[in-house]
Image (cartoon, rainbow, N blue to C red):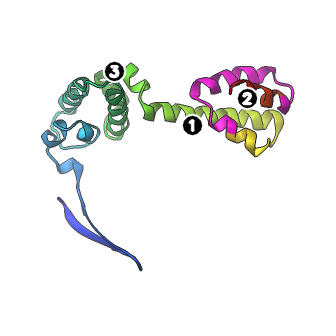
Amino acid sequence: MAFTEEYRDNTTIHQYQVVRLWEQDSTLFLVNPALLPLASLTRTDSPQTLLAQVAEQVATIPDRKERQNIAGCVEILAGLRFDKDLVRRFLREDIMKESVIYQDIVQKEAFKLISRLLKRRFGDIDGSLVEQVRNLSAEQLEDLGEELLDFSEVADLAVWLEQQK
């Protein structure tokens, strides 16, 4: 542990310790699946060896959904430290793409794009329609992007959204 700190407010006091991951031995993080995403940020003399070890440990997680989610977290945190090509060399892209975190990022980016397209096509639209669009999956947003090319008025969007329910 690096040092102890304290946060004080009018109604609360929180004591915490800052852990400098880059000073920690990776072995402690490689034995616990929940800590695997942090392992890529620990001390190492060989980034390739460390990422290979993390990938091996991720591959041993029996539950497919948990494996996908942890792989997605590993990719994101490893990307803070290592080149993306190095990360992708060790972590299978198909597993990462299925992770909840990855899908959430894709959905948010798709929503941003569709929102800009809708605003450009129709100007400001009703907040309830925007909220319905926000709640669409990434796949539905992709479909909407194609359908949007054929819309001539906001009512077309409302009809399309109703059909998605």
Q: CA distance from mark 2 to mark 3?
A: 35 Å
Camera-nearest residue between 165 and 20: 165
Residue drawn at (49%, 30%) of the image: 103
In the image, what residue type sits under mark 1?
Answer: Lys
Q: What kind of secondary structure does the magenta stretch mostly adopt?
A: helix
**Residue 82 left/right relative to 4:** right
Closer mark to the observer between disc 2 and disc 3:
2
For label 1, the SS is: helix
Q: Quadrant of residue 56?
A: top left
Task: Give the percent coordinates (x, y) of residue 54.
Answer: 22, 31
Q: Secondary structure at mark 2?
A: helix
- Tell me residue 51's x, y (percent): 23, 30
Q: Residue at x 17, y 33 (%)?
A: 46
Image marks 2 and 1: residues in contact by CB distance under 8 Å? no
Does residue 69 appear left or right of residue 60 in this picture? right
Which dot marks residue 161?
2
Name which residue lies at 14% across and 44% down: 25
Report which residue position mark 3 lands on.
92
Horizontal and vertical percent position of residue 38: 27, 42
- For the residue marked with disc 2, what is the amino acid? Leu
Of 160 and 56, nearer the camera is 160
Give the magenta part as a residue range. Answer: 132-155
* First reached walking from the N terminus: tag 2 or tag 3: 3
